[in-house]
Image: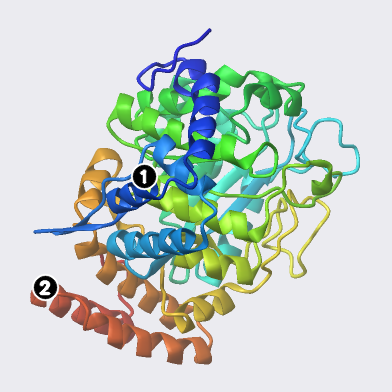
């Protein structure tokens, strides 16, 4: 039997089944232990320091106790602390991005994904470089600066060379005032050598969803193809970091397995990265299984309610306070609004989950990976965020200034990241308002910017940010950053 060891490089030791089961037993036994729950909440609460607020985070076992707790007033306290942590580390900024689907060719047999090899209903498509350029221009014309590229696993149709060519094309397209400044990559687990190539191509974050940490379920859900190898998939982040990628993004697909098991496994993976590499995940995504061609989510009996989903998000925020948290357009406007309050710091906007979808005037559905619940335009999402007190941010400065990995985390954990992120968000929002926004969004945006400039504590930073915003508006200059 494998022994739990967060510093191990073997999947069954750092995501240890017996440790998860023991954690779930402990959480169930203590879900009404008010002195323990209060002590855990106190540990999670942001503490004032000379440099701002500092949070210690929680272990997977402590966080699991909070997730199991069903005492209403304690759940409300979890939400309050999650909001405090979110504001302490990320302020009221929300980073915006869009997924770009390059190819839906795939050799895997994943039973929850319409791209699986045996699905003969779905037309297979792979973008040429000319088509990638058209997609990028369409995204730039919306105002996007940050993309997450997606592709099925197919060594013949989607080899690493194809992915690298696409990244090169994306970064090369400059259209009007548009530019994609950060390309995050969500492709199948690969080799250290290929991760090194991705790093050299200038990617931002490497994202790989685990789907499920329950090995027996994982093997059943991935019956055929290279993704069937649980260990190789689960150990991918270690190979990515060995290849020089220091920003990695985790995630599970909630609804495939019991959510408490997944929650513990996800936090154990974060603890493992911290223990081995000195830096935890840059982002954690929280997708839920959704309807798609050939896929009926009701076939999976572990679906979770909106209330449980909100609680999971808040408990993750308490456990890993420094990590960016992502929710996609899989979720409705109503659900996304709730999650923004309790920890989410990044959202996609105007997403199309089909190959070649952005250059089509009408949203195509025949190659979608999943149904999109929030189908608003980017302009509508930006205005909605601002009307709810958030700053929509198109900032990519940290990545481009080398503030990645442990450099980003050290700044974030000490609260110092706020000194540059707030003005950067306001400057990139100004770019959006000038170049892409509707008159109504522009009006809301400039009122917000005027108010938010007053919150910059450093007078010199405030003066420079104010001048830069004036230059963006009056002299057509772009891409200022702290």
Q: Please give the name of the residue rendered at 46% of the width and 64% of the height, measured from the top-left corner.
A: 73
Mark in the foreground, 2 or 1: 1
Query: Of 328 and 300, which appears nearest the observer?
Result: 300
Mark 2 residue crowding within 10 angstroms, few (<14) / some (14–19) / many (20+)? few
| Image x and y of residue 412, in percent | 25, 52
Q: CA distance from mark 2 to mark 1?
A: 40 Å
Q: Which residue is mark 1?
A: 36
187 relative to 157 in the view: left or right: left
| Image x and y of residue 44, in percent | 32, 51
Residue 475 in sight: yes
Picture disc at residue 6: none
Q: Which residue is mark 2?
A: 458
Q: Please give the name of the residue rendered at 9% of the width and 74% of the height, measured from the top-left corner.
A: 460
Q: Please give the name of the residue rendered at 63% of the width and 22% of the height, measured from the top-left corner.
A: 215
Q: Please give the name of the residue rendered at 39% of the width and 16% of the height, measured from the top-left corner.
A: 8
112 relative to 193 in the view: left or right: right
């Amino acid at each position: 039997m494998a022994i739990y060891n967060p510093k191990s490089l073997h999947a069954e030791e750092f995501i240890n089944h017996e440790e998860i089961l023991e954690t779930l037993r402990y959480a169930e036994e203590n879900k009404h232990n008010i002195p323990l729950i209060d002590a855990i909440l106190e540990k999670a609460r942001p503490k004032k320091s000379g440099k701002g607020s500092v949070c210690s985070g929680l272990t997977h076992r402590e966080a699991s106790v909070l997730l199991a707790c069903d005492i209403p007033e304690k759940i409300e306290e979890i939400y309050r602390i999650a909001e405090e942590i979110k504001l302490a580390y990320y302020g009221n900024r929300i980073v915006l991005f869009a997924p770009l689907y390059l190819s839906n060719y795939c050799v895997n047999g994943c039973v929850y994904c319409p791209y699986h090899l045996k699905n003969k209903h779905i037309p297979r498509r792979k973008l040429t470089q000319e088509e990638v350029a058209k997609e990028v221009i369409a995204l730039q014309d919306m105002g996007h600066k940050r993309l997450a590229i997606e592709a099925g696993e197919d060594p013949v149709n989607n080899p690493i060379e194809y992915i690298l060519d696409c990244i090169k094309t994306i970064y090369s397209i400059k259209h009007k005032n548009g530019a994609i400044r950060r390309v995050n990559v969500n492709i199948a687990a690969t080799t250290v050598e290929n991760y090194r190539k991705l790093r050299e191509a200038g990617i931002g974050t490497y994202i790989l969803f685990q789907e499920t940490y329950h090995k027996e379920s994982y093997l059943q859900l991935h019956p055929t193809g290279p993704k069937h190898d649980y260990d190789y998939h689960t150990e991918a982040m270690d190979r990515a970091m060995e290849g020089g990628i220091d920003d990695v993004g985790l995630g599970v697909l909630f609804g495939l397995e019991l959510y408490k098991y997944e929650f513990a496994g996800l936090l154990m993976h974060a603890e493992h990265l911290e223990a081995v590499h000195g830096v935890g995940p840059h982002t954690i995504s929280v997708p839920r299984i959704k309807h798609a061609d050939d896929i009926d989510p009701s076939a999976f009996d572990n679906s979770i309610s909106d209330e449980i989903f909100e609680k999971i998000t808040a408990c993750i925020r308490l456990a890993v306070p420094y990590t960016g948290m992502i929710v996609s357009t899989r979720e409705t406007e109503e659900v996304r609004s709730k999650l923004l309050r309790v920890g989410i710091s990044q959202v996609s906007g105007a997403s199309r989950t089909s190959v070649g979808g952005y250059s089509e005037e009408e949203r195509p559905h025949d190659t979608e990976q999943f149904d999109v619940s929030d189908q608003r335009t980017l302009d509508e999402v930006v205005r909605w965020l601002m009307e709810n007190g958030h700053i929509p941010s198109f900032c990519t400065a940290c990545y481009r200034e080398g503030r990645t990995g442990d450099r980003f985390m050290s700044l974030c954990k000490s609260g110092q990241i706020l000194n540059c992120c707030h003005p950067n968000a306001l400057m990139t929002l100004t770019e959006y308002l000038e170049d892409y926004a509707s008159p109504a969004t522009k009006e809301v945006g400039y009122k917000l910017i005027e108010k938010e400039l007053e919150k910059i504590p450093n007078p010199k930073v405030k003066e420079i940010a104010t001048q830069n915003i004036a230059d963006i508006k009056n002299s057509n200059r772009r891409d200022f950053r702290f």
